[in-house]
């Protein structure tokens, strides 16, 4: 068995869906296909949630989502008009469930409501894709992953119960008789049956988790790039493709923010030695990148990871004490309570610095809370650049002529916060 994952970009319009169908048709073995929401629908659902939760009009956001999927069906079935009405009926049924949810008084819990709304992207996507494949003669079973992946109630960042999920999945798969199974990434459900999500960009992780629990031979994530490069090809002129990297290298890259792989994806694969292929859905002839167990040393070029819109905060105790455990635990607790995840931190005798993604709605509260115990200064609009396997030339290229606020260097990695 193999796992395929198709992200939003690979299902963004009818031609892309058709292309994904062709890739699946050519697979020739048992494949579990993990689908993301189509195109940018997750962002659209987030906007819908924002309006709804804040008692603002949400008709425009609803219409955008509804018309995107209606257009998708119209385009997909342009040459199969006889199959269109049934596909439309199915779509309307799923959308009506969401509409009913939005029409009754809302729960007061932001993250719970978020998951009930935003999860619909993956459900619609997989339902549309599964039916389309069946209509194309590619027999498949649609699986509601929420009945199998059990999570805790940490809505938006739910954690898997691996043992129970594995047992449920094994049972479900023992009863499926098609070669192809279509399911959703990013979703799970609590013991009460409430839908949860696993964190933005979490479909890569679902693919890895399924591979682990079902003992798959390999995982392929189909992307709009033909592999992992030494920098984001959308931002660099001459990026170098990496034919292979180790699990550990991939974990480091994802952890530091390389968007191409979700950070939680690699560990389950590494634990069972399951290789991960990053390949292009635009050109399936290309080799892609293999992430696997590499024994010994693999020479790699400098690898660049950029994070924009960073805040750098500097925190000093207002009672002139040193930055030691007691102060650090207060600082960490304040960050955690405000839901802020740091991308980098550094401490000196009397000050602690941290860098994190700018979130307008969270910053003021964080600053107020910290100022109860500390003197706080901060800078906005910064960039965090990480270079793995740095060289002097690579560091110069990133820093010359720029204002460097903070540098952190270890044996293989250097990080700069700069303007
Ligand atoms: P998906 O649709 O599967 O979620 P993503 O958009 O998350 O795919 O990941 C693919 C994108 O990652 C590419 O379009 C590319 O711009 C970006 N990217 C960032 N860093 C890298 C890198 N080092 N190598 C390849 N792609 C990268
Ligand atoms: N659709 C979700 C997102 O955009 C999950 C994913 O695509 O990985 O974050
Ligand atoms: Mg992604």
Image (cartoon, helix red, strand yellow):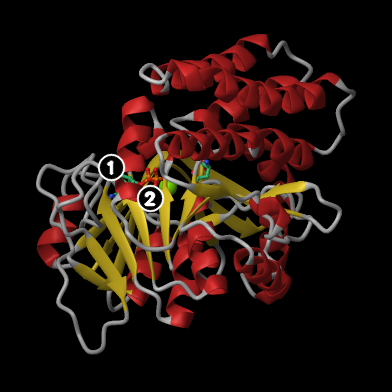
Please state the horizontal and vertical placement of residue 345, each as a whole percent of the image: 50, 62
Closer to the observer: label 1 or label 2? 1
Q: In the rendered image, which quarter contains the N terminus?
A: bottom left
Tell me the tag on residue 57.
none
Label 1 residue near ligand 1, CB within 8 Å: yes
* Residue found at the very far right of the displayed protein: 105
Query: What whole-number distance in Å separates the C-alpha atoms at marks 1 and 2?
Result: 12 Å
Q: Which residue is mark 1?
A: 224
Question: In the structure shown, which secondary structural element does the residue marked by tag 1 occupy?
Answer: loop
Nearest the eye: 390 or 407: 390
**Residue 328 in sight from this viewpoint:** yes
Please state the horizontal and vertical placement of residue 86, each as a whole percent of the image: 59, 23
Q: Quadrant of residue 256?
A: bottom left
Nearest the eye: 244 or 19: 19
Give the left or right position of residue 336, taking residue 395 as reference.
right
Residue at x 64% of width, y 33% of height:
361
Badge 1, how many Cα within 10 Å: few under 14, some, many 20+?
A: some
Residue at x 72% of width, y 42% of height:
368
Label 2 residue near ligand 1, CB within 8 Å: yes
Q: Earlier in the sequence, mark 1 or mark 2?
A: 1
Give the left or right position of residue 186, taking residue 285 as reference.
right
**Considering only vertical position in the picture, is 91 above or below 334?**
above
**Residue 312 in sight from this viewpoint:** no
**Considering only vertical position in the picture, is 388 above or below 298?**
above
Question: In the structure shown, which secondary structural element does the residue marked by tag 2 occupy?
Answer: loop
**Considering only vertical position in the picture, is 372 above or below 128?**
below
Please state the horizontal and vertical placement of residue 149, each as a whole percent of the image: 68, 60
Tell me the tag on residue 259.
2
Residue at x 54% of width, y 56% of height:
342
Q: In the rendered image, which quarter contains the C terminus?
A: top left
């Amino acid at each position: 068995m193999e796992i395929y994952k198709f992200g939003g970009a690979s299902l963004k319009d009818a031609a892309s869906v058709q292309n994904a169908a062709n890739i699946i048709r050519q697979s020739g073995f048992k494949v579990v296909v993990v689908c993301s929401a189509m195109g940018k629908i997750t962002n659209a659902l987030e906007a819908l949630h924002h309006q709804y939760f804040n008692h603002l009009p949400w008709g425009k956001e609803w219409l955008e989502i509804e018309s995107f999927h209606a257009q998708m069906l119209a385009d997909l079935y342009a040459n199969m008009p006889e199959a269109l009405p049934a596909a439309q009926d199915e779509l309307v049924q799923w959308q009506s469930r969401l509409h009913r949810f939005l029409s009754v008084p809302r729960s007061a819990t932001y993250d719970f409501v978020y998951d009930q709304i935003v999860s619909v992207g993956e459900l619609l996507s997989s339902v549309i894709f599964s039916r389309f494949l069946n209509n194309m003669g590619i027999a498949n079973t649609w699986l509601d992953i929420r009945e199998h992946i059990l999570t805790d109630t940490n809505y938006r960042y739910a954690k898997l119960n691996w043992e129970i999920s594995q047992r449920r999945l094994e049972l479900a798969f023992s009863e499926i008789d098609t070669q192809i199974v279509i399911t959703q990434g990013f979703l799970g459900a609590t013991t009460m049956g409430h839908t949860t999500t696993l964190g933005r960009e979490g479909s890569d992780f679902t693919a890895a988790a399924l591979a682990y629990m079902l003992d798959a031979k390999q995982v392929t994530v189909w992307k709009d790039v033909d592999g992992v490069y030494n920098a984001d090809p959308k931002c660099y002129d001459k990026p170098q493709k990496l034919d292979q990297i180790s699990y550990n290298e991939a974990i480091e890259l994802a952890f530091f923010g390389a968007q191409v792989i979700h950070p939680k994806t690699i560990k389950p694969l590494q634990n069972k030695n399951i290789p991960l292929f990053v390949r292009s859905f635009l050109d399936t002839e290309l080799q892609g990148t293999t992430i696997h167990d590499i024994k010994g040393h693999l020479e790699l070029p400098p690898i660049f990871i950029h994070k924009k819109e960073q805040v750098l905060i500097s925190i000093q105790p207002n009672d002139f004490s040193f930055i030691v455990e007691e102060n650090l635990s207060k600082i960490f607790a304040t960050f955690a309570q405000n839901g802020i995840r740091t991308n980098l931190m550094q401490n000196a005798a009397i000050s602690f610095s941290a860098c994190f993604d700018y979130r307008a709605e969270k910053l003021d509260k964080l600053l107020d809370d910290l100022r109860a115990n500390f003197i706080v200064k901060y800078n906005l609009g910064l960039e965090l650049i990480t270079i793995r396997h740095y060289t002097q030339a690579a560091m110069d290229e990133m820093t010359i002529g720029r204002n460097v606020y903070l540098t952190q260097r270890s044996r293989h990695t250097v990080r700069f916060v700069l303007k």
